[in-house]
Image: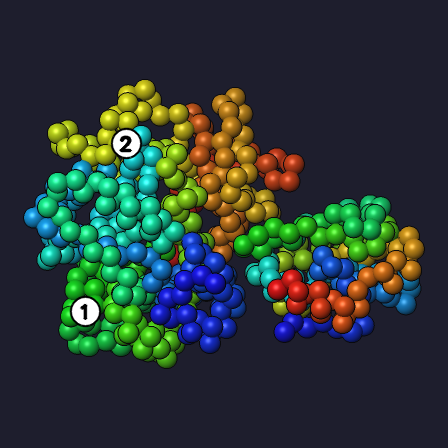
Amino acid sequence: MSNIPADLRYAASHEWARLENDGTVFVGISDHAQEALGDVVYVELPEVGAQLAAGQEAGVVESVKAASDIYAPLAGEVLAVNQALVDNPELVNSDPYGSWFFQLKPSDVSELDALLDADGYRAAAEADA
Amino acid sequence: MGQRTPLYDQHVALGAKMVDFGGWDMPLHYGSQVEEHHQVRRDCGVFDVSHMTVVDVCGAQAKAWLQHLLANDVERLQTMGKALYSAMLNPAGGVIDDLIVYLTPHGYRLVVNAGTRDKDLAWMQSQLGDYAVELRERAELAMLAIQGPHARARTAELVSPSRAELIHSLKPFQGLADGEWFIARTGYTGEDGLEIILPASEAVDFLGELLGAGIAPIGLGARDTLRLEAGMNLYGQDMDEQVSPLVANMAWTIAWEPASRDFIGREALQAERAAGVASKLVGLVLEERGVLRAHQVVRVEGVGEGEITSGSFSPTLGKSIALARVPLATGERAEVEIRGKWYPVRVVQPNFVRHGKALI
């Protein structure tokens, strides 16, 4: 079974979101998602400064096998992107929860509450498997 | 649930991610597809290819029948065990399947694709007519491919002395029997290696011995990237019944001479050749980051458009490569549309890696 940290929030589309003390949110993809994709070979990130709506396409992750869109789990402005993933996409496989894709300044941080908690995501991921 | 090969339980025990492939439950990978790919290029690995269909052809007119059935000419098989790659065409010149045919003491042995088994057998049966030919599908046999620069040496250490001697003496593209095993120096990776057809009851133990000797199991995922790097077609993707071998980089497999040989599809191919073929299958290399995929549109400035038939990331080259069908006049440059953006690609011979070495 894949690793689903209890301190994160999850979208049904397999992104995780981590709220920082400064009120910003880091976004990546779950262990379950990287495992389903297989070896990641390409990552496309949003533009810094972009305003994303919740559920809006924010990037792409491609494995040898397939391409998959990354969605913004909540609305906000892109503050930073993780260039290291562009240079070393395999980090998404080896360290999915350290491999953040982008950092958001949320429009409304309470949108996090609408996302799944670890138990909710585990149930969704199992149903999906 | 799909069909299972005799080695299904071993795949599951090895932690394989199982997927449907042409109606069969097959291992996609056992952890990392990219690692498995490198393993075959650098050392060797073993693939379960028992889903493939083996058909023995015998009878007094086996040769004459195959000369009618196949676009390549089995007359070219002059030494025992020699193998030939051929298309089996429909009357319109479309590819029903691609296959390997070996010359055997009893006639011929054909290995055809798994996903096309039913239609292949039905087509072959329908073409028997009055020929004195007997077809025998060998569903009781399993098939293992051991591929990589060290495949033959490593395998020879694990088998009987007579089989080891056979493995050492086989020429490329030759397959011979030893007892109930048929051992061929063929494959689908662009590396040296073996394909061994053996009774299903013995395959379980033999796979166990190969794994026990440290030979890594390799899934269908790596099989696909290995064959793509080697520029080998995948049936159903790079060609099918709508596509002629002339535009599938398979012109070399058509035996035009002798002109008197009347093989199925000949007339259509001759007409196509006389009219001039419109397209060709080429290789593409993406120099920027990104991944080429089947069905992406290829644009050639001043010439026209084409389409990617197979595309993936090449683990050996560290960049994306593809096979694409493009207008005949295509030169050295083209562009590919990925998610609405156009990326420049280099057009090359569809042969990217052989024997561990980059060719582009």
To which chain does the residue with label 2 belong?
B
Q: Nearer the viewer, mark 2 or mark 1?
A: 2
Tell me which residue sits at (42%, 54%) in the image: B22
Residue position for label 1: B180
The residue under label 2 is B91
Could you say which is closer to the camera, residue A84 or residue B61?
Answer: B61
Considering depth in this image, is B48 or A19 the residue closer to the camera? B48
Tell me which label, 2 or 1, sits earlier in the chain: 2
Q: Identify the residue at the far top of this view.
A: B275
Q: Residue at x 31, y 30 (%)?
A: B92
Amino acid type, label 2? Pro
> Is residue A97 depicted above or below B175 in this figure?
below
Can residue A96 be seen here? The reply is no
Q: Position of residue B124 (x, y in %)?
A: 24, 45
> For the residues tagged 2 and 1, is the chain the same?
yes
Q: Nearer the viewer, residue A78 or A1?
A: A1
Q: Is residue B346 left or right of residue B354?
A: right
**Of the residues shown, which amino acid type is indicated by label 1?**
Glu
Q: Secondary structure at mark 2?
A: loop
Side (left or right) of B210 relative to B313: left
Report the residue at 31% width, 78% height from top: B205
Place of residue A88 in the rendered image (x, y in percent of width and height, measured from the top left): 63, 59
> Marks 2/1: CA distance?
37 Å
**Label 1: chain letter:** B
Residue B193 % position (x, y): 29, 62
The image quadrant of residue B49 is bottom left
Quick check: marks 2 and 1 in contact, CB under 8 Å?
no
